[in-house]
Amino acid sequence: MSATWEVQKSLYDVLANDTDFMALVENRLYDEPPTNEVYPYVTIGDCTEIPDNRLIRNGFEVTMTFNIYTKSGGLGFYIGKKIYERMNILLNVKKPSLDTLTMVICQLDNTFTDREKDKRVISVRYRVIAHSDETITF
């Protein structure tokens, strides 16, 4: 059992279904980064999963990174941070629904800003803890 895809799908759906967030990114929320970049846009970045088993239940800790890309210039980081603020309202200390697991918590882990040639990047990482409803038998 893996929680990675289920968490990715859930967090993506939360963002994609929020009209305010999608207006900020002009409907550019991607799993795969685009080849023809139009700014701003958000992509799903790195993801890790580690076991977080509790007593008689399987559990998972998933870290999911979202990368916010904006164009360099006077408002590059400002626009990115507005997008980040909305993302945080939707995801930080929330419990989005999962298909086969129970979400324990989704919380902000860290953010990182970077100047990458002619664009600005804000990487936002969320830590998600989820448990299986199935009881482990020994």
Image (tube, grey):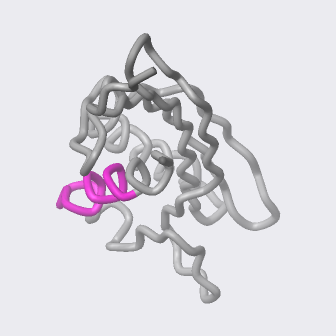
> Residue 15 in magenta?
yes
Considering only vertical position in the picture, is 86 above or below 130? below
Position in image of residue 47 (x %, y %): 61, 48
Which of the 4 image quarters holds residue 71? bottom right
Q: Main secondary structure of the magenta part?
A: helix
| Picture layout, residue 76 above or below residue 95 | below
Judged from this view, the residue extending furthest toward the top is: 55
Residue under the image location 65 percent in, 51 percent down: 46
Q: Kindly identify the residue that appears in the image at 61 percent across and 88 percent down.
A: 36
Q: Is residue 43 left or right of residue 48?
A: left
Q: Is residue 79 above or below residue 86?
A: below
On whether residue 16 falls in the magenta region, the answer is yes
Foreground pick, 30 / 8 = 8
Which residue is nearer to you in this view: 127 or 39? 127
From the top left corner, tell me how far across and down residue 32 is, in percent. 56, 74
Vertical order, 5 against 47 (above or below): below
Q: Is residue 29 left or right of residue 66?
A: left
Q: Residue furthest front?
A: 138
Q: Which residue in the rendered view is the most extreme toward the right?
A: 117
Residue at 62% from the left image edge and 32% from the top image edge = 50
Decide which of 133, 102 is in the foreground and name it: 133
Q: How many marks?
A: 0
Residue under the image location 26 percent in, 46 percent down? 98
The quadrant of the picture occupied by the C terminus is top left
99 and 32: which one is in front?
Answer: 99
Residue 73 point in image, percent of width and height: 64, 60
What's the magenta region?
9-21
* Residue 92 image point, x, y percent: 35, 29
